Image (cartoon, helix red, strand yellow):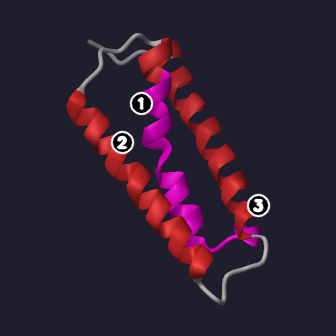
Amino acid sequence: MSYQNTSMSSSVIINQATIIFVYMISLFTLKKPFNIRKLLAVIVCIESVAIISLTDHEDHNAKDNNVVGNLLALIDTVFYAIYGVLIYVLLPPEK
């Protein structure tokens, strides 16, 4: 549904930003240690999502409902991050 209401570039970049939410969720739920390098990677990811979203918003050919589509893509990304963390918890990697 988000693909119908936003540009493909916005949808793809927002979906690829799953790492932002995986990192935040793992910090609080899995008690993973804070790492400055991971935080810097998350900041770069947030900046790229913002840049793509803003440039799509300024595009004159952008769809009228691109904000709705971006929000739907963001919700999808958050749920996918939760799924990824749950998989890690329920099926931990072999040691």
Mark 2–mark 1 contact, CB under 8 Å? Answer: yes
Identify the image quadrant of residue 54: bottom right
The residue carrying mark 2 is 42
Going by the numbered disc 2, the residue's amino acid type is Val
Magenta includes 39? no
- Drawn side of residue 87 relative to residue 34, left or right: right
Q: Out of 18 and 42, give the one closest to the viewer.
A: 42
Q: Which residue is mark 1?
A: 23
Q: Secondary structure at mark 3?
A: helix
Locate the C terminus and report the quarter of the image it occupies. top left
Residue 68, numbered circle: 3
- Going 59% across and 45% down the picture, which residue do you hit? 77
Q: Pick whichever of labels 1 and 3 is earlier in the sequence.
A: 1
Q: How many marks?
A: 3
Q: Distance of mark 3 from mark 2, alpha carbons?
A: 24 Å
- Which residue reaches farthest left? 37
Percent coordinates x, y for residue 85 in the rendering = 51, 25
